[in-house]
Amino acid sequence: MAEPTLIDVGQGPPVLLLHGTAPGTTAAANFTRLLPALTGYRAIAPDLIGFGASPKPADANYGPALWVDQAFTLLDDLGVARVVLIGNSLGARIALTMATTQPDRVRGMVLMSARLHPSKSAAQDLIRAYRPDPAAMANLLRECFATDPATVTPEMVQERYRASAAPGAHDAIQAMFRALPAAGPGPRPDQLRSLWMPALVVSGRDDRIVPSADALELAGLLPNADLHVLAGTGHWFPLERADTFAALVTDFLERLA
């Protein structure tokens, strides 16, 4: 049976979850530990075009504009007028762009590991250099994402490797890496200052991919943002600090009611 391109579970106020864009990522992989906490909400989590079970057209203009359009089209198709956005890494940039484009449709935002400025690191170089291979995937997860190597299980490695090796997946992510510099850094500071909806900004202190300083700056720009920087973890705080993160998200959602 083919894997679904969309997770759509639960009933209640809708929440759209936008995954990041590392090799082998999918909506399920990004949000598997958070979804059980979203009781009482309609959790909508698509595989972005180029990832997971979604189409991977060779001629697509991969990048934030494509995924913003995908997200709004999905909401329209589902009849969802207003939504809370939960964006992880580049998914946070997609969420911010959606909010600046159609702010009346966004009730609130949870922004995870959001990047504001270009930066270089060994982890980023390793991600860009990845070629589908199980051993390379294991090394990628341990060196770039996991603070505790025990977080990386053989099952996780195989799942992410298979997703990264799916037909068209590697070409899609490489096209994204080539396109991102031309796409620019995302919404401007003046645009971010205009976003008055409640926001929750969360980062791992030891993030090797997106510096946690970006989270501090982002929270300072958004007029109605709370900030949490989690110690002892990095880009994978949704897995390594899953209970803490879920508590932060559910508290935020409850306060929006």
Image: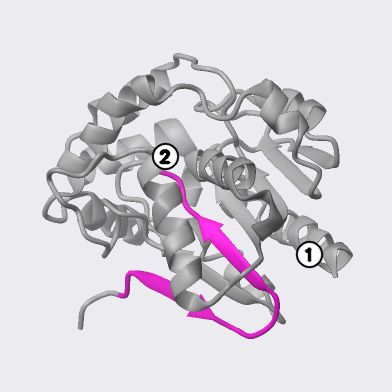
Horizontal and vertical percent position of residue 179: 29, 27
- On residue 64, the disc is 2
Residue 157, percent from left and from top: 31, 52
Question: Where does label 1 land, which residue?
Answer: 253
| Span highlighted in magenta in the image | 4-21
The vertical placement of 51 against 111, above or below, is below
Amino acid type at mark 1: Leu
Quarter location, residue 125: top left
**What residue do we see at 33% from left, 30% from top?**
127
Q: Quadrant of residue 35?
A: bottom right
For the point 57% across and 63% down, which residue is it?
A: 16
- Residue 204 falls left or right of residue 152: right
Residues under labels 1 and 2: Cα distance?
A: 25 Å
Compared to 250, does 152 lie above or below? above
Q: Nearer the viewer, residue 86 or 37?
A: 86
| Three-letter code, disc 2 | Pro
